[in-house]
Amino acid sequence: MLTPVVDPDGAPFWEYAARGELRVQACAAPDCGRLRFPPRPCCPHCQSFADEWRRVSGRGRIWSYVFPHPPLLPDYAAQAPYNAVIVELAEDPLIRLVGNVVAEPDAALDSVDPSRLRIGARVQVAFTEVDGMTVPRWLLERA
Amino acid sequence: MATLKDATAIVGIGQTPFAKQLPESEKELACRAIVAALDDAGISAAEVDAFASYTMEETDEVEVAKSIGAGDVTFFSKIGYGGGGCCATVGHLAAAIATGQASVGVAWRSRKRGSGPRPWKNTAVQLPTPAQWTRPFGLLRPADEIGMLARRYLHEHGATRDHLFNVALACRNRANQNPAAIMYERPLTREMYMTSRWISEPLCLFDNCLETDGALACVIVAAERARDCRQKPVYVHSAAQGLPAQHHGMVNYWNDDPLTGPAWTAARHLWKQADFGPDDVDVAQIYDAFTPLIPLSLEGYGFCGRGEGAAFTEGGALEIGGRLPINTGGGGLSEAYVHGFNLINEGVKQLRGHSTAQVPDAATCLVTAGEGVPTSAILLRS
């Protein structure tokens, strides 16, 4: 499996994930405070370089999804077809995270029946460890 | 203010055969396409003093210039973002020639994507910003990234796979008229489309472009000189690049509306500089690495409103005789996928009146580059 190739902008996201916390970069300027993703050095709204990592609820909705089929990299082909989803966060629907909906935090990428996925479905973050790195996964909330 | 409008013209085009596998190296294919384009123009290689290509092009201008016997080169440029750079190769040369930095420009693309490696399999090279946020989750290939937009598009606009089939079919029908196309003798039916294997559901095999070996090139000179060349000049009427505010690269799920991509940005500038608008376009060559890029681009370039691109494809609108014939050589879906360069050359063929699927009296053509990535577009006129 591919693990995130972390850059300085993204490092805090993965450090908080390792503690089981979903945090999103936010502007720390008093008059702004807007969330931004993917992380970057400077706020695109007010140009402030002050930032903080704000904890979010981990709740969201599926914005879109695909089921990749081979040809794929071997570790992914072994689980194909699996789902890859985009989740828009409850706190700000413009903050969208790519991830996978799974039956249990440590379950395989193909562990949820594809027919259960739909745009707008509510999901909740969970975390799992992949080759020594903690990454988010998403669990369907019961309707 | 100085203007690019009709200041330069494409006077030569060249191409190699297209195939899943060609024996020649990318460098040799590049040289063959360029030499053919210069021969078409009736211009000697020694007169070439400008080059433009893509950053993904592996043969650099030094190798090309010394191989073909170019003279002293005073302008050279490479454009980033894969197929998004396609039309900008012509745009950069037009700007250089119109401002006197050079006099004979060659744009080219050579690629062995048919027999060579698939870029997404190289996990050592990480795409810029988005890679850490997408690839670990199995969003590995461009087809997966565009599949996300496609699913959302179908959902938001009540579109169906039949709309994507309309795109695939129009391109295939044109390829069936074009002996140089890889799919020349291979018709496509709705049954084949609907029962084909998935690549990244909702995208099936026929929603994806061809994996091709091949090369193309074109030659650009000032308008005054073009009138003395061997071929009827095809003028570069308008050119634009597009990097929208808050864009993020190949995948952009993080702006307000991911379904309005770089095409919208390029289009605004393209039309602002032009003497005509979308209704006056006789034929279009629209970048088609994946079928959903057509409805997205139809909207972006103003042929219809936001969300109306799928419906636009109905009733044979994209076929010859339809409202907007597209990709008349077969496009990336059915002629060859060489990062869109065959779309440029096909636009030239249409305005010369020499296409294998000629639109009667075509005098204006839009050519677009990859949508989703930072992009580019040109308007050609005869």
Image: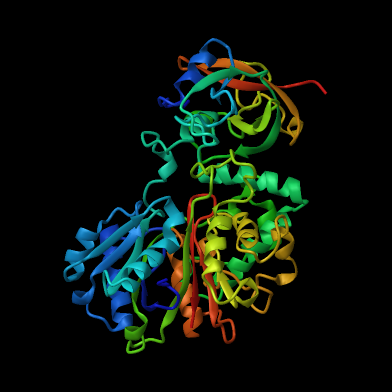
Q: Is residue B143 above or below residue B47?
A: above
Q: Nearer the viewer, residue A31 or B223?
A: A31
Image location (x, y in percent) of residue B251:
53, 42
For the point 30% across and 53% down, the residue is: B58
Image location (x, y in percent) of residue B82:
42, 52
For the point 65% across and 70% down, the residue is: B318
Farthest residue, direction right = A143
Farthest residue, direction top = A19
The colour scheme used to paint the residues is rainbow
Q: Nearer the viewer, residue B12 or A34?
A: A34
Picture quadrant of residue B127: top left
Q: How many marks?
A: 0
**Left or right: A137, with A11 as reference point:** right
Picture quadrant of residue B292: bottom right
Q: Is residue B227 above or below residue B151?
A: below
Q: Determine if residue B68 is in view.
A: yes
Assign the C terminus of chain A to one quadrant of the image: top right
**Left or right: B67, with B8 as reference point:** left
Picture quadrant of residue B282: bottom right
Q: Is residue B34 above or below residue B80?
A: below
Image location (x, y in percent) of residue B242:
50, 55
Q: Determine if residue A83 is in view.
A: no
For the point 28% across and 65% down, the residue is: B51
**Left or right: B225, with B258 as reference point:** left
Image location (x, y in percent) of residue B84:
46, 55
